[in-house]
């Protein structure tokens, strides 16, 4: 049984899954912080599903990009459970987890997360043939740069993630489709789909070296944007 966590945004999500089967998923957005509600949330979900600690064979969590504080809370909790329960720990890129929502859809998945000041965290994935293959490396870009990069591909492009809604007008104008509202945030269920692929390949993470993925622009990029009035 796989226990997965996502705290990369304001939304808190945790799930229980077996291969190809989602057993339970609890997703909530409340005024409480992730540190206040994550462990009680997991405890209640496991009780509701009738799952014992001994049933958990691996723990997975999203490692970013995303909220600085949220990622640290999720990763620290996942490391703690992995250590105490003596089970493998799996780190999943947040953008990749979002793309798994469209697996098998014969489209390019364009996960977008807000990086402020007109920038987004973005990557491009091919979701055909029940696989998720990265076509464009992730990074921090101006939304206009992302749109220019993905135009004219062989498959339709579907934008998802919280920033897809923020820049919906620009995306639609460029002919980029928008995923349904239910795919506008990363969820523990999609983290589970990506984590299972890693488990099949025995790609567990080392808790001592596993850190949040905080994507940052280079200093040269920041200075260029300041000179050209982009920030």
Image (cartoon, grey):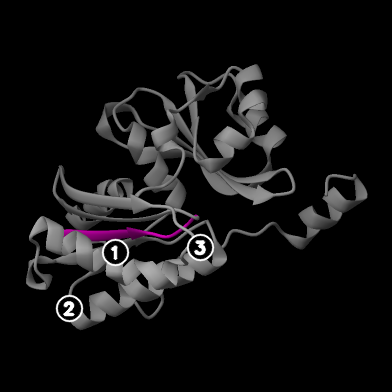
Q: Hey, which quadrant is residue 172 in on the image?
A: top right
The location of residue 214, given as percent across then percent down, is 56, 63
Q: Which residue is mark 2?
A: 85
On the image, numbered disc 1 is attached to which residue?
41
- Which percent across, then down, holds residue 100? 34, 40
Q: Can you give x and y, in whole percent of width and height, for residue 4 in the image?
A: 27, 59
SS for tag 1? helix
Query: How many neighbours does mark 3 have within 10 angstroms: few (below 14), some (14-19), or many (20 or more)?
Result: some
Q: Is residue 230 magenta?
A: no
Residue 146 locus on image (x, y percent):
64, 35
- In primary-sequence order, the first of circles 2 and 1 is 1
Q: Which mark is residue 167?
A: none
Residue toward you, 182 or 203: 182
Mark 3 and mark 1 lie on one chain; the one further toward the N terminus is 1
Q: Residue at x 47, y 19 (%)?
A: 156
Q: Earlier in the sequence, mark 3 or mark 2?
A: 2
Q: Residues within 10 Å of mark 2 (few under 14, many from 20)?
A: some
- Whole-angstrom CA distance, mark 3 to mark 2, is 25 Å
Secondary structure beneath dot 2 equals helix
- In this rendering, the label closer to the viewer, 3 or 2: 2
The magenta-colored residue range is: 2-9
Q: Residue at x 46, y 38 (%)?
A: 184
Comparing labels 2 and 1, the label whose residue is closer to the camera: 1
Q: Tell me the mark number nearer the camera, choosing from 3 and 1.
A: 1
Up/down of 122 relative to 198, above or below: above
Residue 213: which numbered mark, if any?
3
């Amino acid at each position: 049984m796989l226990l997965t966590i996502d705290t990369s945004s304001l939304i808190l999500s945790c799930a229980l899954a077996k291969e190809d089967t989602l057993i339970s998923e609890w997703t909530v957005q409340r005024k409480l912080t992730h540190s206040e509600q994550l462990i009680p949330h997991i405890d209640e979900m496991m009780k509701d599903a009738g799952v014992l600690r001994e049933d958990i064979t691996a723990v997975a969590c999203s490692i970013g990009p995303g909220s600085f504080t949220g990622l640290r809370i999720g990763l620290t909790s996942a490391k703690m459970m992995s250590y105490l329960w003596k089970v493998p720990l799996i780190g999943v890129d947040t953008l990749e987890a979002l793309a798994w929502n469209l697996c098998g859809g014969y489209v390019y998945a364009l996960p977008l997360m807000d990086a402020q000041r007109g920038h987004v965290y973005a990557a491009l994935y091919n979701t055909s043939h029940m696989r998720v293959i990265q076509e464009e490396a992730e990074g921090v870009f101006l939304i206009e740069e992302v749109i220019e990069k993905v135009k004219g591909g062989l498959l339709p492009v579907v934008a998802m993630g919280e920033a897809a809604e923020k820049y919906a007008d620009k995306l639609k104008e460029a002919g980029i489709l928008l995923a349904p509202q239910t795919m506008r945030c990363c969820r523990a269920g999609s983290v589970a789909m990506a984590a299972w692929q890693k488990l099949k390949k025995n790609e567990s993470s080392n808790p001592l070296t596993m850190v949040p993925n905080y994507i940052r622009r280079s200093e040269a990029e920041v200075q260029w944007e300041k000179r050209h009035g982009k920030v």
